[in-house]
Image (spheres, helix red, strand yellow):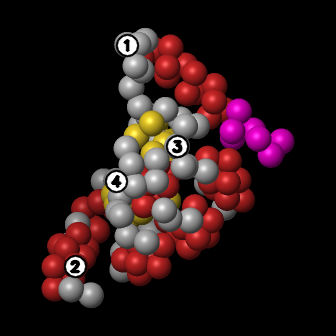
Amino acid sequence: MTEKQASLISEFLLLTSFLESNNVQLAFESDYGASELTAFIDQFPKSVFGINYDIGNSASLGYSVTEEINSYADRIINVHLKDRLYNGSTVPLGMGNADFIEAFKLLKAAGYKGNFILQTARATDNDHVGAMKGYVKLVNSWWMEDGS
């Protein structure tokens, strides 16, 4: 662990009592790989510190959704639903490298009950409401993909 990482961890740990007494959770979003992020988040109490898992960012970095979710599912408190190309930018849901069906299957198996946050590409025709409705329908179909 670097000195900067140790300092960051130390500073955030000082907030633990405040966060607990105010019923607040803090979610880290990171570009660490599964083992690095697990080692990092394990430095913090589960009661108030967790992970914001961004499916699209992980796809862009070439990470395995299976390895990531299996490594720290119990620490995921939010999920960003975004699609990205490998080493590329955000694209409409279903047009990139994010494996939503596998992610949803693993999150369900882990008992995930947190938030899903649509962090999607903007509509190219400025019909953002229409695009969002389509994304919601698509996400619902993926969530139900395995029949549960």
Image location (x, y in percent) of residue 119: 41, 37
* Other residues around mark 2 within 10 Å, as few (<14) / some (14–19) / many (≥20): few
Mark 3 or 1 closer to N-term?
Answer: 3
Tags 4 and 1 touching, CB below 8 Å: no
Give the label, 2 or 1, closer to the camera.
Answer: 1
The residue to which callout 4 is attached is 24
- Label 3 and label 2: CA atoms lie apart by 32 Å
Q: Quadrant of residue 44?
A: bottom left
Residue 46, numbered circle = none
Mark 3 or 4 closer to N-term?
Answer: 4
The type of residue carrying mark 4 is: Val
Q: Nearer the viewer, residue 65 or 89?
A: 89
Mark 3 or 2 closer to N-term?
Answer: 2
The residue to which callout 2 is attached is 5
Residue drawn 46% across the image and 47% down it: 85
- Label 4 and label 1: CA atoms lie apart by 36 Å
